[in-house]
Amino acid sequence: MGLFSFIGKKESAESSAPAQKFPSNSRERILKDAYRVGRFTPSNTQCSPNFIENWINNNVDCFEPVLERFFAEHTLEEVTKQDVILEVYRGFSDLILSEPEIEESAFRLKNPEAIKVAYEVFRRLAGKHGMILPDR
């Protein structure tokens, strides 16, 4: 065998591992996509105690068109919009937790406090879709 013996050689069907496939609108796939929306949507994760209401409104404005597009692109049969919004919140919470934790600061809430405030973002988004999220 030469140095470039792999060129032109096709991989056999036995050696390639089958990829896990979800039907495009399965419950698992929709919730996974919803989590990714929360985790990877470019949004503001650093909440200032002096501007909590502005932070909430800015994130509502950020997530609203993203959720509209999500609901337009996914057929929700096994999943409710409430499930989707809660999963987006879970992804956003993980995004906040990925930020470095800080000591006491007058300019930014600690990550657990920001997650509590972030729930209000998703309560307002749910309200725009005619739903009510439970209190936390």
Image (cartoon, rainbow, N blue to C red):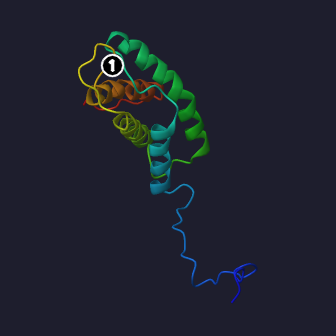
Answer few, some or many: residues within 10 Å of disc 1's Cα (few below 14, many 20 plus, some between 14 and 19): some
> Which quarter of the figure is the C terminus placed in?
top left
Residue 93: percent from left, percent from top: 36, 36
In the drawing, does residue 52 fall left or right of residue 105?
Answer: right
Identified by mark 1, the residue type is Arg
Residue 135: percent from left, percent from top: 26, 29
Question: Looking at this rendering, what residue extends furthest in the right direction?
Answer: 8
Which type of secondary structure does the marked residue at label 1 adopt? Answer: loop
Residue 36: percent from left, percent from top: 48, 44
Q: Residue at x 38, y 13 (%)?
A: 53
The answer to which image quadrant residue 85 occupies is: top left
Question: Looking at this rendering, what residue extends furthest in the top direction?
Answer: 50
Viewer-side residue, 111 vs 36: 111
Question: How many numbered badges does the structure rendering display?
Answer: 1
Question: Looking at this rendering, what residue extends furthest in the bottom direction?
Answer: 1
Q: Residue at label 1?
A: 108
Q: Is residue 25 above or below residue 95?
A: below
In the drawing, does residue 45 fall left or right of residue 70?
Answer: left
Q: Residue at x 30, y 30 (%)?
A: 111
> Which quarter of the figure is the N terminus placed in?
bottom right
Question: Looking at this rendering, what residue extends furthest in the front direction?
Answer: 3
In the drawing, does residue 126 fall left or right of residue 42?
Answer: left
Q: Residue at x 64, y 84 (%)?
A: 12
Residue 89: percent from left, percent from top: 39, 36
